[in-house]
Amino acid sequence: MTSRRQIGAGCGRASAATLPKPPGESPVARSIKLTTSLSVRCYSPAPAPRGGARGIATIEAMCGRYAFYKAHPELRHLGRKEIDEHGRKTPPIELPLFEAYNVAPTQDALVLRIGEDGAPRADLLRWGLVPPWAKDLKFGARCINARSEEAAKKPAFRAAWKARRCVVPADGFYEWDSAAKPKRPWYFSHAKGDALGFAGLWESWTDKATGEVVDTFTVLTRAAYPKVRPVHDRSPLILPPDRWDGWLDPARRDPAPVLDGVPDPHLAAWPVSYLVSNARNQGAELIEPVAAK
């Protein structure tokens, strides 16, 4: 029997909530072992720069970092999951799973998708989409983002575009202002504190050597919203809650109409500390405003 990397499945990789951690470090903080040759240059206007702690790549692609840390009441019902796809009992997911102020590529992150029973559910998936035909998981480092204008035709994304879509809940996301020296990170969130829902795609990849199944996802992007444009030319594609069901519906083979006329989100933005550039750093101080220089 194959195993699946998914919270509560009782097999595969441990969830971020159970990983051992150094004192004072958030459970979601873990090393991102990417080489600069595997940086997300396919979807970034510039290669990811070298730097950060040893074994850590500083990712400044769009969208390469985000935060999800609030307990949004409107999402709690999606966290109830007692039976997995193999019929095993699993503990229900409580939202939020952890305070994630610095979610980064290759980490497990929460996504909303349609389960086998046809109902929305919350699962932990690895960030960086790996299509079934990929040789190994390293492929995902190049697929943390997918341009919404092109995803339907790209080999890595076109199958998921038709049938495996997800919503990635977030409280905000980070962008780096390339005009500043060094590049200054900015934080963008809903002006009223509501949850943001990034449009995403997901896939399952099977390790041929072990039979383990790993579910992975990517975040769709679009031309920058007006609030983001002074800092970056791309933004995550943010869906209002009334578009989530239509986007997730697996019976809809062409989801493009769901994206038509999507209103711009009401965003707030401010510069934040350079600490966010290192994926090991976590904590509320990462989203606190600082003076832009």
Image: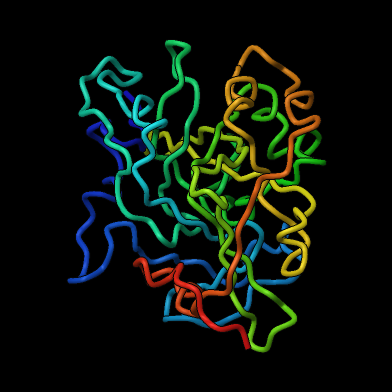
Instruction: Compare residues 108 and 277 and report the one nearer the observer.
Output: 277
Horizontal placement of 71 versus 142: left or right? left
Q: Is residue 182 visible?
A: yes
**Image position of 140 with respect to 244: above or below:** below
Question: Looking at the rendering, which quadrant does residue 123 occupy?
Answer: top left
**Image position of 252 with respect to 153: above or below:** above
Give the image location of residue 63, x and y in percent: 62, 56
Horizontal placement of 146 versus 19: left or right? right
Give the image location of residue 225, x and y in percent: 75, 53
Question: Looking at the rendering, which quadrant does residue 227 occupy?
Answer: bottom right
Number of labelled discs? Answer: 0
**Image position of 274 with respect to 248: above or below:** below
Give the image location of residue 90, x and y in percent: 22, 26
**Image position of 145 with respect to 245: above or below:** below
Q: How is the image coloured?
A: rainbow
Instruction: Compare residues 283 and 124 and report the one nearer the observer.
Output: 283
Question: Looking at the rendering, which quadrant does residue 268 occupy?
Answer: bottom right
Q: Is residue 208 visible?
A: no
User: Which quadrant: the C terminus?
Assistant: bottom right
Residue drawn at x 60%, y 17% is 249
Residue drawn at x 51%, y 66% is 34
Horizontal placement of 263 versus 13: left or right? right
Give the image location of residue 244, x and y in percent: 59, 27
Residue drawn at x 51%, y 57% is 66
Q: Residue furthest front?
A: 192
User: Which quadrant: the N terminus?
Assistant: top left
Residue drawn at x 76%, y 68% is 230
